[in-house]
Amino acid sequence: MIPATLCFCFQGDPPERVLLGYKKRGFGQGKYDGFGGKLQDGESLLVAAGRELTEESGLYAELSDLMPAGVITFIFPFKPVWNQEVHVYVARKWQGIPTESEEMRPEWFPLTAIPYDQMWDDTRIWLPHILGGQKVNAIFSFNRDNETVKEYTLF
């Protein structure tokens, strides 16, 4: 199980817009998602979340401004090397302007226009809870296509 992070930046309180990144290469290519990835050697989850946010979006958030929002386990029975335990964070304060990187193209979306049809299949299930201020703990298992959700538990 690969430990990883995912970070979403919100504008407004309550949130009115969310910053998503269009993945240009690698795992999840062609999909919108938050900003995140795997930990580097000796790195904590929180530090990894901050580093990935900066690398992929150009934004910098103080670690104290990255709020834990849940843990989601992704199981790919037909491609176990993709199995991940993802620690989700939310940022409402940061510095900088979203800037395209080699890996991601950031874009703000109103909460009423999130491109769920261009995201991982599971996202439409758990992201609305986080957008509503709840913490999410979940397990998702994927079908043979490694794209669609076979079953899930949200708790």
Image (cartoon, rainbow, N blue to C red):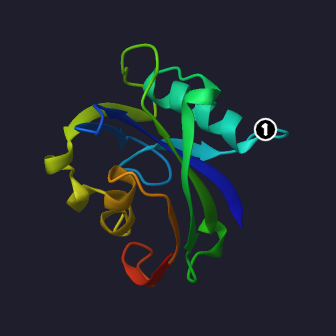
Q: Position of residue 28 (x, y in %)?
A: 43, 54
Of the pair 58 and 136, the residue shown nearer to us: 136
Q: Quadrant of residue 84?
A: bottom right
Vertical placement of residue 98 versus 152, above or below: above
Q: Residue at x 66, y 68 (%)?
A: 81
* Image spot of residue 125 (x, y percent): 34, 69
Q: Which residue is located at x 39 percent, y 72 percent?
A: 147
Circle 1 packing at 10 Å, graded few (<14), some (14-19), many (20+), is few
Taking the view exactly as shown, the residue that stands out farthest to the top is 96
Closest to the observer, 50 or 141 = 50
Count the marks: how many?
Answer: 1
Which quadrant is home to the N terminus?
A: bottom right
Residue 116 screen position, x and y as percent: 24, 58
**Amino acid identity at mark 1:** Glu
In the image: residue 19, left or right of residue 41: left
Q: Compared with residue 45, is residue 104 higher up or lower down, i.e. above or below?
A: above
The secondary element bearing badge 1 is classed as loop
Q: Quadrant of residue 82?
A: bottom right
Q: Nearer the viewer, residue 68 or 98?
A: 68
Looking at the image, is 58 positioned above or below residue 43?
above
Q: Is residue 142 visible?
A: no
Q: Residue at x 54, y 23 (%)?
A: 61
Residue 93 horizontal/vertical position (percent) = 45, 24
Can residue 89 be seen by looking at this rendering?
yes
Q: Give the residue at the far left of this rendering.
A: 112
Residue that label 1 marks: 43
Image quadrant assignment for residue 86: bottom right
Q: Residue at x 59, y 45 (%)?
A: 37
- Horizontal side of 81 relative to 111 (left or right) equals right
